[in-house]
Amino acid sequence: MVRDTTRRRVLQLTGGALLLGFGSASASAQDDDEAIEPETRIELDAQTPGWVGIEPEAIADEDNPTLTLQDGETYEIGWEEGDGASHNIELVDENDEVVDDYETEEATEGGEDQFIEFDVTDEIVEYVCRVHPNTMRGEIEIE
């Protein structure tokens, strides 16, 4: 998490410097805060040290990316690629309890059965691999 904060701050400072230096708008960390489009398939790489974002492009290569989603909209989340260890994915509330049965079975290989289609509610605060809950956990922010 510290790395994401530092990266975001560097992008903010760089974006500001570019704006001052050239007097024109540039891409900045503000783009990271935009909600992912509804009906998007959010694909992650299941690695024991942490989830790695694959799709959409806004989360590509980020470790345990924070997902900003739109309240009441439908999304799909899961993994096809992994490191060969056993993983699953769950959507949990603030008490770390699964919301509305949004969870998959543990598996050593990803695939279609490792994706969950879900409707966003303010109950959902994180996605987690129950097998590796200390390393494979990311925040979900609701707009």
Image: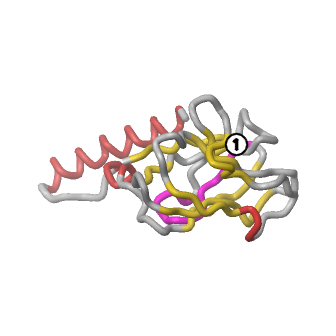
Residue at 74% in and 42% down: 49
Amino acid type at mark 1: Met
Q: Is residue 25 above or below residue 122?
A: below
Q: Is residue 85 above or below residue 125?
A: below
Q: Quadrant of residue 79?
A: bottom right
Image position, residue 104 (x, y; %): 76, 55
Q: Is residue 33 above or below residue 110?
A: above
Q: Is residue 51 magenta?
A: yes
- The N terminus lies in which quarter of the figure? top right
* 83 or 18: nearer the viewer: 83
**Identity of the residue furthest to the front in this view:** 100
Q: Is residue 96 above or below residue 129?
A: above
SS under mark 1? loop
On the image, numbered disc 1 is attached to which residue? Answer: 136
Image position, residue 91 (x, y; %): 63, 46
* 28 or 119: nearer the viewer: 119
Q: Quadrant of residue 50?
A: top right
Residue at 58% in and 41% down: 126
**Identity of the residue furthest to the left in this view:** 23
**Identity of the residue furthest to the top in this view:** 95
Compared across the picture, whether 30 is left or right of 77 comes to: left
Magenta extent: 49-60
Residue at 49% in and 52% down: 120
